[in-house]
Image (cartoon, rainbow, N blue to C red):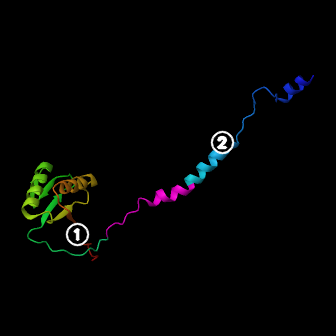
Amino acid sequence: MISGDNRLSGRSGDGVMSDINVTPLVDIMLVLLIVFIITAPVIHQAFRLNLPKEHAQKHELQQDDVTIEISGAGALSLNGRPLSEDALLEELQFIGAQRGNDTRLHLHADQTTQYMNIARVLALAQQAGMTRVSFVTSPPQKAR
């Protein structure tokens, strides 16, 4: 019987193939592996930062410069006068209208200040139209 031999071999001309073909799966996995190998170094270098050096150029305060202080707890003050965020925005808009948006802002932030508070102040300055912001740091302490 010819049909019995086909049944024993597992291959019949009219039936479904019972073996799993892994060749397409291997091909897809190799393509994905190549894509990840190529894109991994690009993603790693996309977040490169140039952090400021501690020896920055010294700038003397001018009479029309504005000083904003941020404490470690997030309290804000403008030229030594404590303000809320809304009041700071109003003051910055008033200063921008009075002196122009070219007024330099000096931002003093405590070392323990969270970046979220600094970003919030920068966003307020941007809303007020201020574009010149300087970050004020203390000079490094010399060893005794």
Q: Which residue is mark 1?
A: 138
Whether residue 80 can be seen here: no
Magenta stretch encompasses residue 50 = yes
Residue at the extreme left:
98
Q: Nearer the viewer, residue 117 or 134?
A: 134
Query: Residue 11 falls in which quadrant of the image?
Result: top right
Label 2 belongs to which residue?
25
Q: Residue furthest right?
A: 1
Nearer-the-camera pick, 126 or 63: 126
Question: As drawn, is 7 to the left or to the right of 83?
Answer: right
- Give percent across and percent down for residue 109: 21, 60
Tell me what residue is drawn at x 70 percent, y 40 percent. Answer: 22
Q: Residue at x 22, y 60 (%)?
A: 110
> In this image, 82 relative to 31: left or right?
left
- Residue 124 appears left or right of 27: left
Q: Identify whether 72 is placed above or below 18.
A: below
From where the camera sits, is residue 29 visible? yes
Occupied quadrant, residue 134: bottom left
Q: Type of residue at label 2?
A: Leu
Q: From which residue to which does the magenta span run?
A: 37-52
Tell me the distance, in whole angstroms, between the alpha carbons under discs 2 and 1.
60 Å
121 or 43, nearer to the observer: 43
